[in-house]
Every structure is written in C-alpha cells, then in structure tokens.
Amino acid sequence: MPPQRKNRDFGWLLIVCAGLLPLVLGILCTAIEARHTVSQQQISTANSLLTQAEKMSDNAWDMITQLRQYHYQPCAKIEDQLQRAGTLNAYFRSVGLLSGENISCSSAFGLANGTLTQMMMQPPPITGKAWWSISIRGTYGVPNRPAVVFVRQLPDTTGFWAVIDGQYLMDFMHAIGESRGYQMSLRFSGGAPITSGPADIEPELYLKSEPYQAESSRYPISVNVTVPASELLKAWRQALFIFLPMAAIFSILLMVLTANWLRRRISWADEIRRAMRSRQFSVHYQPVYSTEIERCKGAEALLRWQLPNGEMIRPDIFISHAESEGIIVQLTQHLLDLMAEDIQGWEVEPGFHIGLNVAAEHLQHADFVQDIQRFARRIKDKQMVVTLELTERSLIDDGELVARKLRYLQSHGMKVAIDDFGTGHCSLSYLLTFPLDYLKIDRGFINAIEGLEVETPVLDAIINLCHKLKLDVLGEGVETSLQYEYLRQRGVVLIQGYYYARPMDNDRLRAWLNEQGRQPLLVEESHEPELHHS
C-alpha cells in the first residue's frame, strides 16, 4: 500500500477513534455513576430499615421493663392488664411472664400457655445472656407469619417476654423497596429471615445484582438489600439520557480538532519541503562583537521563512514542526547550502567566526559529521571558523557518541558552544563531559543587570566559572550600554544583541561589514539611574 494511502487511512482511523473516545468514556463514566447512585440508594434503604428495626426493639425492651411490675403476681390477677398492654401498644403480637421454661402468663392465652419452645416452635437460643432476641418463622398462635421474640430472664429463673409481629417489618420493607424491586431480608441474632421482595433476582444484560449488608450498632440486627439488575440498567439509562447530547457535541468537536491537527501536521511537512524547493527560506545573520579586537569577529546564522505573499513564519513555529515531523535534518542541510552560497560573496578577515544552531536530531544523525565537513570545504577559501551552537537538550541522548563527533570536528578547526546556557537542567555536568570552546549566556540573565555596581549573583557565577575553566563567554541579547559595560568589566569578550547589530539578510550584512564591521563599538553614555543598596 502506498505511504500516502497508509497515512490517509491512519488519519481516518484516528479521527474515528477521537470521535468514539468521548462516547466510550461517557458510557463507562455513566455506568460507574449509575452503580454509585444505586449503591447510595441501597445504603439509604438499609439504614432506614435498621432504624425501624431498632425503634421496634426499643419498644419491645420498654415493654419488658413495664412487665416487671407484674412480677410474682398470679396470672388471674394480671391477665387483663397484660391483654391491654399487648393490644394498645403497637407492633406486639403478645406479651407475658416466664417461670423457667414455662410461660406462666400470656396476654393471648392466659394460663393455658405451654412452654417457650412450644410458643416459638423451636428451642430458645443458648446465648448465656439474660437479655436476648431472635427472629423466628412464626409462633404457635400465628405459625405462618414471622415474628421477633424478646426475652428477659432473671436469676431466679423467672422472666418476661414479648413478641413483635414480623408483618410490621414486612410492610415497612414493602413500602420502601417495592418501587425499585429490592429484595430485602432482616435477621435478629442470626435467626429466621424476615423478607420482602421477589424471591429470586435474575441477572439482566450481564449486569450482576449487587447485595448490600449492614448491621446495627445497638442491637444484633443485620440487614441485606439486593438490587435487581433492572434497577442498575434504569439508572444507567437515565444517566446516558443526560450525558449523550453532551458526549455527541464533544465527539464532533474532538473529531474536528483531530482532523485540523492532522491536516496541519501533514501540510507542515509538505509546506516545508515545498518552501525549500521554491527557495522561500533565507538566512539572516546577527554580528558578534569582540571587545579584544574591537570589531566584528563573527556572525550567527538565523534561518528565516517568508511566504510568497510576504508573510513571515516565526522560526520557533516551523522549526518545532520540522523537529516533530522528522525533517529537521533536511532543513539544516538546506540551511548549510544557503549559507555556503551567501558566504561566497563575503570579504572577511581570516578567522572570522560563522555560527549555526544544530538540532538534536541532526547532531545524532549518521550524516552529521559529513554534512558539517562538506559545508566547511565549500567555504574553505574564506578561512573562516565554523562554530556549532548546541542547546543542552542536544546533548542528552547518547552523550559519548556526541562527544566523539564534537572532538573530531574540533580537531579539524571547528568550535563548539552551548547556546542559551543556564536554561537547561544539567549545564554544569556538560562542562566536564563535552568538549566546549565557549558558552552563550541566555538573555534572561543579561536582562537581570540593573546597574554597574549592582551584582547579579547567577550571572557573575557563570562568568567566573567560565574564566576558571578557560572557556570564552558570549553575552546574548545585549540591548543597552549598561549591559555592555557590565559584561565588559567582568571579562566577557564576545557580545551579541541589538545594542551592537540586529539580524540582517545577506545583502545588508555585506554592506554592513564593509561600512561598520571593522569599526570599534561606540559606547553610549548610560542615562539609566544608578541603583544603590540601602
């Protein structure tokens, strides 16, 4: 398949993926949100059920406390009072007194009561406690409806009991869970479950029913609330209904942005190649002044791109695109060709420096050394010194191989400098690792100069370090006489900036070199107020 066809197919695939991304993320996020919403509903339902069960338990234990007033009284005397207590108080099925295992009196049956086991239709639990409660499937009088038994046993084997009808709890569960199809169960002390809701919940659309369990902090009561898959699906649909319009808008927007980005990405590479073929690129040169010889000692080459309509493309824009799209090596090779053509018409003294910026990709490219040597051969008759200006980022990868390349080129008379020194992360280690001839101090440090007597600690430290390492220093971005004098007094030999000369095209540079390049810099008197430390 042709490369262009592959790129086009990949671009369409990327655009489709960009459009699907908000939808997929929205589906996942709404599913999570739906599950969270249902989970909160479960928790709220379980807490409501526990609160109701605790309230009924409070009433039961209050009832048993009230029954103590009938202790040791004959059943015939208190039977009417027990009936009123069991009838007038909500929730209760029956209440009564115990004598050992036997029910000595009951609000429902009077003296004909039988044993506690017969009444519960199961043996009492062995808890070792005087107070206990348990949920059961039914009682002797109402065998088909669950209930909760509460018992208080005294040391003399007598005691009191109360039975709460489970129907109250079932009605409450039905009221809070029927609309959502919840399956709920309630147990006292691990006894028989009091349940409400469908017996079995079938999974729907691969959504698993999620049970939630909770326990009371006051009584031995446990609750289980199970949500049907249909409730999860319902919450998910509601969330999707709200989200999908926004997701569709984001999807379209992202597809448009991706398409524009792809179009710019493809067009930048094509436009740069087309611009090189049609010679839209040119080189501007910014002179460098030497305080030792008091005249122009060299120039830095700066690539410029002017469209046929006269519009200028900023270097930081087209260079970053050239780097990201893998054509920076071709662009640098084109720069070397343009420089070689320009330099043929220069009239400069031997040893004139010509500097050019080298990209990291070119520095590590297999043709780097060959490209630089070819350029040096083309300007050999001018006896110029080629200076390679590298950024700290250029030296990060494969440092040993880069160092060998630089040493080889130095052995053939070329110079190596670090551009924008001090703005990277490992500048000091580079001074020891790589073969360097001079440093270009970033304009940010130059701008910090406020007066001849006002120190700039970082700038001074860099200058002093270079002197100790016997490296030349070039100050970039010098724009005022104050900055020039400050640097000159501290032994900075090379100066570059608008104060001396602005970048200019080849024709203007040739005229400037003939008229001003051999003249010393006339330092203007600084009219800036002198700053003093208080």
Image (spheres, rainbow, N blue to C red):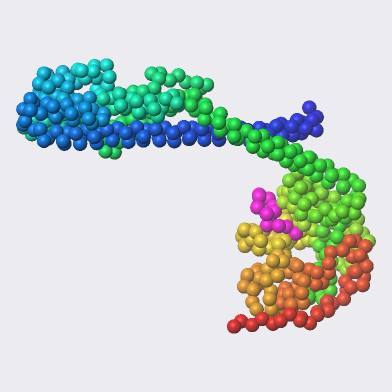
Q: How many marks?
A: 0
Q: Is residue 1 left or right of residue 241?
A: right
| Secondary structure character of the magenta stretch overall | helix
Q: Residue at horizontal 20%, vertical 36%?
A: 62
Quadrant showing the C terminus: bottom right
Start and end of the magenta stretch? 389-404
Q: Residue at 83% across / 76% down in the picture?
A: 521
Q: Tell me the quarter of the image containing the N terminus.
A: top right
Relative horizontal placement of residue 36, taking residue 386 as reference (left or right): left
Residue 142 visible in the current orientation: yes
Residue appearing at x 45%, y 26% in the figure? 179
Taking 53 as reference, is 290 left or right?
Answer: right
Image coordinates for residue 58, horizontal then vertical, percent? 24, 36
Residue 192: within the magenta? no
Along the line of sight, the residue nearer the viewer: 384 or 396: 396
Task: Identify which residue is drawn at 5% across, 31% down.
Answer: 72
Residue 154 vs 526, above or below: the answer is: above
Residue 162, x across and y down, in percent: 19, 28
Instruction: Please state which of residues 201 and 101 is positioned toward the viewer in this rendering.
Output: 101
**Is residue 396 a member of the stretch shown in magenta?**
yes
Left or right: where does residue 229 sit relative to residue 96? right
Q: Is residue 161 above or below residue 372?
A: above
Question: In the rendered image, which quarter is residue 474 located in?
Answer: bottom right
Q: Quadrant of residue 420?
A: bottom right
* Residue 404 seen in the figure: no
Percent of width and height locating residue 347: 92, 66
Is 254 above or below relative to 513?
A: above
